[in-house]
Image (cartoon, rainbow, N blue to C red):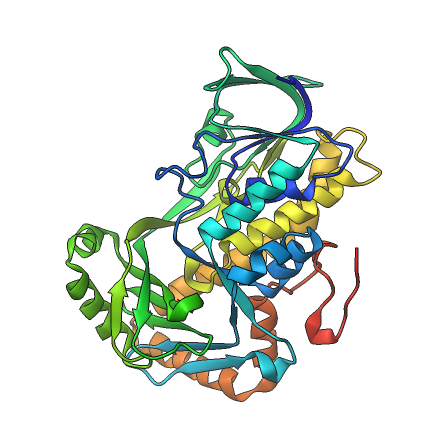
Amino acid sequence: MQTDYDVAIVGGGMVGASLACALAGSALRIALIEAIPPKSDQQPSYDERGLSLSLATQRILEGLALWPSLSGGATPIEHIHVSDRGRFGFVRLHAAALGVPALGYVVPARELGRVLLAGVAAAGNVDFLCPARVAAVQPGPDRVRVELRGGEPAAGLDCRLLVVADGTRSGLREALGLDAEVKDYGQTAIVANVTPEHPHGNWAYERFTDTGPLALLPLAGGRCAMVYTVPSAAAPDYLALADDDFLARAQARFGRRLGRLRRLGARKSYPLLRLVARTPLRERLLLLGNAEHTVHPNAAQGFNLGLRDAAALAEHLSGAAAVDPGARELLEAYHASRRRDQDRVLRFTDGLAQLFYNNRPERIVLRDAGMLITDLLPGLKRGLMRRAMGLGGRQPGLVLGDPLRGESHGH
């Protein structure tokens, strides 16, 4: 086993594996450390969830040469319908009106995992250490010592940069004393695939209700990925319901736009938190993905934001200035380049949570009037679409141009 690396990434989930793929073929030696085998039932990153990928994410994956392997299992989102249950507000968005083939794509998480890990396996400069858990970390002025358990006995490695990408409840972030601010929304997302009576027509629906949003995202074979948000205190009761009873509750929340909801898949639940690292970096240490920032899923921004971070970090690490990938000034330059996009997404998702889960009469009128005005005014709608597609502000170079401006360039 090699024991000397330029970059060690702890966490082989979607963002960690994406960073490894983005660094494939570079001059850097990479270790990707993951505790749970990808095909294990205990692996949370690559399950049956439907992931909504923004247009910017699709273009990053295209730049990484991963999209051709993923596109066959991706369902385009050609239309989006956002509504407020029992109220008059709604917004409709259409790809054709913006001159783009899709507003985004939906892929099963397991398919994205398959493609990412195939990219990792094909990279000559990336070692995938799995199963392996970090037992101890000893930062030093020139190297970080990482002790591992699992796999080879008493294994360990040295790296010049340690990237912590092991999720929202990162034990390593806490062990390293990288502080984070956590807000519990008191909500739980129940995720399952469902088959509606009528074809979805590549529409994505997000319906805000008094208990949280209910989203239906288009999947292949006429199925939809459902994300049903409920109060956390009630989540065990929802999970214990018989399939027909659960579907009846979802039907009452969603309505009949797709006819009767039927054929429910396995249900999984995820408590919803807002997490923001107060200390996202230190010399030779960097947080990435949900370990750095976890957002409410109401606008499907989480993985899309994490991938933009990973693409930007790969640019900084692969650049000519990356003589030392763990240098404090390089990490600070990377983080400065991402701060505006991160802050924008954090404010946007938290603002939606505050606006739509507040049933004071004046808030109801404000949000529904705002939705109607947005639906009627092309300029506002265009701005909303740029945000939904992940195209606000400066983007990593792997985003191949801005389709709303007719830009296209290669890398």
* Residue shown at 51% from the left, 82% from the top: 374
**Looking at this view, is 323 or 282 the one in front?**
323
Q: Is residue 385 above or below residue 285?
A: below
User: Residue 183: image x %, image y %?
Assistant: 39, 48
Left or right: 286 in relation to 196:
right
Q: Quadrant of residue 238?
A: bottom left
In the picture as drawn, the residue positioned furthest to the bottom comes out as 376
Left or right: 239 in relation to 344:
left
* Residue shown at 45% from the left, 29% from the top: 35
User: Residue 2: image x %, image y %?
Assistant: 65, 18
Q: Is residue 242 visible?
A: yes
In the picture as drawn, the residue positioned furthest to the right comes out as 320
**Looking at this view, is 177 or 236 the one in front?**
236
Left or right: 87 in relation to 248:
right
Count of labels in the image: 0
In the picture as drawn, the residue positioned furthest to the top comes out as 154
Q: Is residue 283 visible?
A: no
Q: Is residue 378 above or below residue 313?
A: below
**Looking at this view, is 226 or 348 the one in front?**
226
Location of the C terminus (image quadrant): bottom right
Location of the N terminus (image quadrant): top right
User: Residue 352: image x %, image y %?
Assistant: 43, 65
Q: Quadrant of residue 192?
A: bottom left
Left or right: 193 in relation to 124:
left
User: Residue 48: image x %, image y %?
Assistant: 39, 52
Q: Quadrant of residue 298?
A: bottom left
